[in-house]
Image (cartoon, rainbow, N blue to C red):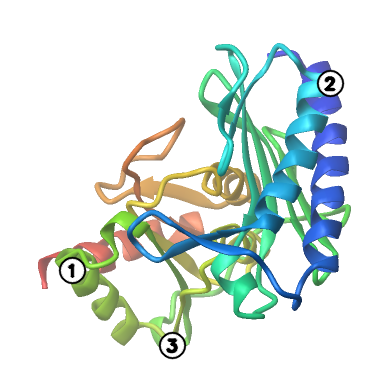
Amino acid sequence: MDRTILHAAREVAVSAVKAAGDITKQRFATYHQCEDKGAFGDVVTEVDHLAEQVIVEAIGHTFPEHLIRSEEAGQLGKESDWLWLVDPLDGTNNYVIGLPVFAVSITLLFKEQPVLGVIYEPMTDRLYISIKDEGFFCNGVQMQMKKKPQLQLQRATLGWIQGHLVQHDEQAVQLRQHLDLKCKRMLRVWAPTLVWCMLAKGDAEAIVLYNSEGEDLYSGVLMVQEAGGHVMDFQGRPFQGMCEEPYLIACHPDYKEEWLQIVKQGLRA
């Protein structure tokens, strides 16, 4: 992997997320042309498309030989070892109801391995960057996941991320209820990239993800891994690469066995 390309990609991604973020912030709390997307309650607005256009044009101009997969536009360009994943407005459902919890996410993968993640939170002006083997940064400050003396479930904040296609899955409901009763607070903010950043910063203890794959996944996974966190599947195997139907647990590595057992208990309940 050419790190010259990787560092040039970081500059393009940072510029693009900020430009897209400015669009989302300027148009927040105004009227939006909102359309249903799919049969599971998801929506899309003109802001998604405007922000996406800015990002896709920036990437395509600098890296015309790279493949882009974007949330609204789909797949653009030719097959390549380099794949860009773009979510121009992660948290659209929040956005349309006036809840200022949303972000812009760009991921670059090389041979299906995430190597660059850039997430921008416009309303707080927080910029998160991770590069494979170079760490996790928030507004230029390198951060590591906080280690706590012991895992106390009654004090734990857990992020729950669930895919649209499995909203009413009985096993998902069962597991979610089990975890909700075990922990102090379960976060379901419908902006997954921000939950991953919270975990990477140490503001949450774990994430349980139930079959939610998309353009918003891999930037967050890289953030947590580069902050020293552990990401595994429901069988306890380390998560690497891409997966169409991921079932994941992310947490501090010292408590991976505890969280794995809690999830297994919930699946058996």
- The residue carrying pointer 1 sits among few (fewer than 14), some (14 to 19) or many (20 or more) residues within 10 Å by Cα, namely few
- Tell me which numbered mark, 2 or 1, is placed earlier along the sequence: 2
Residue 250's place in the image compared with 65, above or below, is below
Quarter the N terminus occupies: top right
Question: Which x, y percent locates residue 88?
Answer: 67, 49
Nearest the eye: 212 or 116: 212
Label 2: which secondary element: helix
Q: Mark 2 or 1, which is nearer the eye?
A: 2
The disc at residue 265 is: 1
**Residue that carries the numbered disc 2 in the rendered image:** 62
Report the side of 97 relative to 171 (left or right). Answer: right
Query: Which residue in the structure is indicated by mark 3?
Result: 184
Q: Residue 92, percent across and down?
A: 59, 64
- The answer for how far apart the CA atoms under marks 3 and 2 are is 46 Å
The residue drawn where x is 38% and y is 83% is 183
Which quadrant holds the C terminus? Answer: bottom left
Disc 2 residue crowd, few under 14, some 14–19, many 20+, Cα 10 Å: few
Q: Amino acid at mark 1?
A: Gln
